[in-house]
Amino acid sequence: MPLKYPSGEEILKGDRVRFFGEPGEVVMVVDGLVGEGENDWHMKEHGPGVMVREPKYFGVAYITTFEKLDFVGRGQDP
């Protein structure tokens, strides 16, 4: 089942977001075991979630709840 923002859009790698109001980017989406070490480790240890890069306060954070994650646009959008 795809992971979704509170607004209903599917969360995809490369998405531009606001994380606690700060600009960020989704760098990994983990919604199942895929045979890749980092993805599978996060899935086994924490469950489905996303890795968000937000350099001002958090650096990189793995999150499993998305209420503070707002969709801004797809990575390929201008």
Image (tube, rainbow, N blue to C red):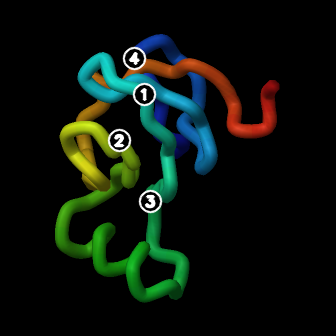
- Binning the other alpha carbons within 10 Å of mark 4 as few (below 14), some (14 to 19) or many (20 upward) gives some
Q: Nearer the viewer, residue 33 or 13?
A: 13
Name the kind of residue labelled 2 in the image: Glu
SS at circle 2:
strand
| Numbered mark located on residue 23 in the image | 1
Report if the CB atoms under discs 1 and 4 are less than 8 Å apart: no
| Total numbered badges shown on the rendered structure | 4
Q: Disc 2 marks which residue?
A: 54
Kindly report the distance in space between the C-alpha atoms of the residues bearing marks 1 and 2.
6 Å
Kindly report the distance in space between the C-alpha atoms of the residues bearing marks 4 and 3.
17 Å
Name the kind of residue labelled 1 in the image: Pro
Q: Nearer the viewer, residue 35 or 23?
A: 23
Q: Earlier in the sequence, mark 2 or mark 3?
A: 3
Name the kind of residue labelled 3 in the image: Val
Q: Is residue 34 above or below residue 30?
A: below
- Binning the other alpha carbons within 10 Å of mark 1 as few (below 14), some (14 to 19) or many (20 upward) gives some
Q: Earlier in the sequence, mark 4 or mark 2?
A: 4
Q: Earlier in the sequence, mark 4 or mark 3?
A: 4
SS at circle 3:
strand
Q: Position of residue 75 (x, y in %)?
A: 70, 38
Residue visible at 56% across and 32% down in the picture: 16
| Numbered mark located on residue 15 in the image | none
Which of pointers 1 and 4 indicates the residue nearer the eye? 1
Report if the CB atoms under discs 4 and 2 are less than 8 Å apart: no
Q: Disc 3 marks which residue?
A: 30
Q: Nearer the viewer, residue 16 or 3?
A: 16
Name the kind of residue labelled 4 in the image: Pro
Report if the CB atoms under discs 2 and 3 are less than 8 Å apart: no
Q: Position of residue 11 (x, y in %)?
A: 54, 37
